[in-house]
Image: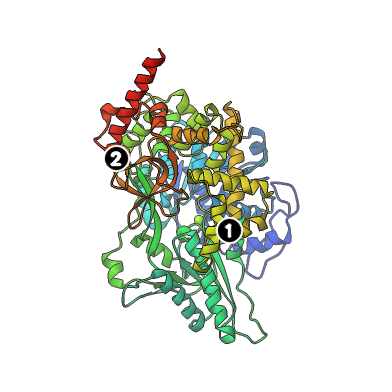
Amino acid sequence: GGTTAHGFDCSNMSPVNRWNGCPYSQRYYDMLQKRTRLPVWHQKREFLKALKDNQVLIIAGETGSGKTTQIPQFVLETIDVESAYKHKRFMVVCTQPHRLAAMSVSCRVAQEMDVTIGEEVGYSVRLDDLISDKTVLMYLTDGMLLREAINDPLLWRYKVIILDEANERSLATDVLLGVLKGVLKKRHDLKLVVISETHKAKKFQNYFFGAPLIKVPGRLHPVEIFYTQEPERDYLEAAIRTVVQIHMCEPPGGILVFLTGEQEIEDACHKITKEVSNMGDEVGPVKVVPLYSTLTPLMLNKIYEPPPSPLTKDGLAGRKIVVSTNIAETSFSIDDIVYVIDPGFAKQKVYNPRVRVESSFVSPISKASAHLRSGCVGRTQRGKCFRLYTEKSFKNDLQPKTYPEILRSNIAHTVLTLKKLGIDDLIHFDFMDPPAPEALMRALEVLNYLGALDDNGNLTKLGEILSEFPLDPHIGKMLVASSKFNCSNEILSISAMLSVPNCFVQPGKAQKASVDKAKARFRHIDGDHLTLLNVYHAYKQNNEDESWCSENFVNYRALKFADNVRHQLACIMIRLNLKLCSTDLNNRDYYTNIRKALLAGYFMQVAHLESKGHYLTMKDNLVVHLHPSNCLDHKPEWVIYNECVLTSKLFIQTVTDVRGQWLVEIAPHYYDLDNFPQCEAKQLLKKIYKKKVETRNKTR
Ligand code: ADP
Ligand code: MG
């Protein structure tokens, strides 16, 4: 005990950890000392009093003030160990919009509490969890809490629910807000803490009937902002150039660069490392670290490591350079960052309900986002933010804020979840920002075509089943159908592969030829879905070997994840009594069955090859083109596609050849010609229907 150098008095503390009865380790005290210096620490008493007196509480503060790691621990102080273990239902949960954040923060907090991760502190994210019956604090994704509400509508297991990063307004958070508002009315013993970024706090206060707000004081040090004189032609090249300049000319301190996606970030990391090493000993060594959502928590830890040491005793100082997606705007705070580079772009999801196209675009960020980015420095010392756009552009071109996800998404799965929660009147559901009526209607229509909702909008038996899959309902439908088409083992693998976007490594231009050659080995001429299946099978046949993956330009991490997803999905199928089966590989229907099962899920995503040489999507009549990445050796008359992407043209990606006859066999309710716009496909379908009637009459 005694008073430490920082004036922190631990003499009156129990030396025994009340959660597991073990004496505290030295690391615990070291970490505690750092924790007491976080801004929120000084508001602990105020927070605990407000929590006692109110059912809902809003906390607002800048990134890095200690909200995510400390607030849940403060809440735990109000919980009695005995009763926590006896009643099993007095758990504290903290939601996160990003699975990576939920996993890594829980590990950090387990360390701070001096307990083993997965025991007293755990996490639960889609398709992965680490909890035990001792768990008293759980970090989980907002989507997982929503799923729990399905089985336990009043969330009886929880005593305090903390909605973290509510300002991010993820789809699941928005739905949870509405659901929790209802639960709070029925459970007076339940408490809710909403954590938000400062500027958005007011809106949450209003939504929760003027709940009190606790503001955590922000940054202490000034941040200098620089703009470019002229617009940059190539933001990526400009970002890399700026990194190198800072490294050459500016005093020590970490750099954080915002880019848009995994591949771009990996490429940039390579380029930065290479350029710096080309400069030899004119500059200090660098440690370049990527940060994006599909990293593992272990890989993520690198962002918190110190910069590399100088190469020689009197050598130049080393520097840490983190290259991240916008996940670093609020989810992760890195203390030793002094310079931020903001090229002004992010990948954003956009959904057009009229044509049912959801796509990710690289688009300009909002002013709010730019503020968050510049706020990533200045916490521990003065900082600099380099915006790679002009000041005029910042003032005139950037939108004031980013629209919540619910206004930009395909909400079919959300609607299914709400129906399962027993919320039938979606029009009057208390959304903080209600989705557009058109998006809602579209979702209801899609679910009706899939057979998840009946004509009165009620959940069907199939709808109940589809809501059990943490996936887009189309994929759920495909899985359900696959048992009947005798290929559920294969459809499981394809579904898992579809949930990992980058199964091939995409190195620089130099290696493109060898990558294409490697890809060709897995190619199935009837379509990309079957190619994905080949990749998965090859991975398993080669014993999930990492070096086999790198030799074949297959992304080992992606495959490993897909395999895990597959396992989880298989468990759900077994639980739902859906048969796991395969057609014999030598049977000539092996691939036909798989293609039919694919169609059973994706019959609303079909395009037809028109006589002019382009494709037209069914019913919406959009002109689309096969994405150049496809592996077909021909242009099939009919294709199903997994997604539409808009770049120079509207492309359909991940496509597979299907037959016109199957459309009529598998989805006659959708291919109902009375409700079909004029197009070449309609004429063809007419003929197919006619032929079908004729053969039926003949066989009679
Ligand atoms: P907020 O939620 O207010 O943004 P956090 O609670 O996430 O703040 O972070 C508080 C502090 O803990 C920050 O200084 C951050 O850098 C540090 N921190 C969080 N996770 C880790 C980790 N895994 N390793 C080292 N430091 C961490
Ligand atoms: Mg946080």
Q: How is the image coloured?
A: rainbow
- Using the image, determine if residue 213 lies above or below residue 387: above
Specify whether residue 154 is in view.
no
Quarter in which the C terminus is drawn:
top left
Please state if 128 lies on the left or on the right of 654 as rendered: right
Task: From the top left corner, tell me how far across and down residue 458 is, in percent.
Answer: 39, 24
Rendering quadrant holding ligand 1: bottom right
Q: Residues within 10 Å of mark 2 (few under 14, many from 20)?
A: some
- Using the image, determine if residue 64 lies above or below residue 278: above
Q: Residue furthest top?
A: 700
- Using the image, determine if residue 214 lies above or below residue 31: above
Specify whether residue 206 is in view.
yes
**What residue do we see at 38% from left, 20% from top?**
695
Task: From the top left corner, tell me how far across and down residue 557 is, in percent.
Answer: 60, 54
The disc at residue 620 is: 2
Quarter in which the N terminus is drawn:
bottom right
Task: From the top left corner, tell me how far across and down residue 440 is, in percent.
Answer: 33, 37
Residue contact at pointers 2 and 1, CB within 8 angstroms: no
Q: Which residue is mark 1?
A: 553
Instruction: Assign a secondary structure to mark 2.
Output: loop
**What residue do we see at 47% from left, 50% from top?**
631
Q: Residues within 10 Å of mark 1 (few under 14, many from 20)?
A: many
Q: Amino acid at mark 2?
A: Asp
Q: Nearer the viewer, residue 248 or 37?
A: 248
Q: Quadrant of residue 218?
A: bottom left
Q: Nearer the viewer, residue 475 or 550?
A: 550
Instruction: Assign a secondary structure to mark 1.
Output: loop
Please state if 41 lies on the left or on the right of 450 as rendered: right
